[in-house]
Amino acid sequence: MDAIRIQTSAITRPSINLHTNPSGISFMKDKLLETDKSVFSVFGPNLGHYADDIIIVFKCEISPHPDANFSIQAATSFVSGNAFVLRPWLGKDPGSLDE
């Protein structure tokens, strides 16, 4: 019973935390970018130590679906300017969020 209780608590606590504070990893730009309303994941190596290890595998047919939204970088990388540094083929950093 103790093992079941421990595992149940390990599952329940994070779930309650997600419902209590549903703003992603609490990055201050999440609400601005509305990424706090999305489920997002990293495809490939994730070197950040601020998120849990959750792996989602999609069928090939999902990618072109009109409700699917895939990006090769996090939305927050546009705000920080890192998208333009790490992926120079995106062009020059426009310098403002509106641009």
Image (cartoon, rainbow, N blue to C red):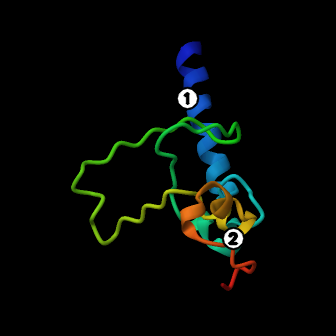
**Quadrant housing residue 57:** top left
Q: Is residue 59 left or right of residue 38?
A: left
Q: Nearer the viewer, residue 24 or 49?
A: 49
42 relative to 95 in the view: left or right: left
Q: Residue furthest right?
A: 28
Return the residue found at the far top. Answer: 2
Residue 8 location (% of width, % of height): 55, 29
**Looking at this rendering, what residue extends furthest in the left direction?**
61
Q: Residues within 10 Å of mark 2 (few under 14, many from 20)?
A: few
Helix, strand or loop for disc 2: helix
Q: Quadrant of the image for the N terminus?
A: top right
Residue 8: image tag: 1
**Above or below 76: residue 56:** above
In this view, the mark in front (2 or 1):
2
Residue type at mark 2?
Lys
User: Residue 96: x percent and y percent?
Assistant: 74, 80
- Spatial separation of the CA atoms under disc 2 and disc 1: 31 Å
| Point 68% across, 65% down: residue | 30
- Tag 1, which secondary structure? helix
Along the line of sight, the residue nearer the viewer: 89 or 66: 89
What's the residue type where badge 1 is placed?
Thr
Label annotation for residue 31: 2
Most foreground residue, 81 or 12 = 81
Residue at left 48%, top 61%? 71
Q: Between disc 2 and disc 1, whose residue precedes?
A: 1
- Toward which corner of the image does residue 99 lie, by quadrant? bottom right
Q: Position of residue 79 (x, y in %)?
A: 71, 68
Q: Is residue 38 left or right of residue 98?
A: left
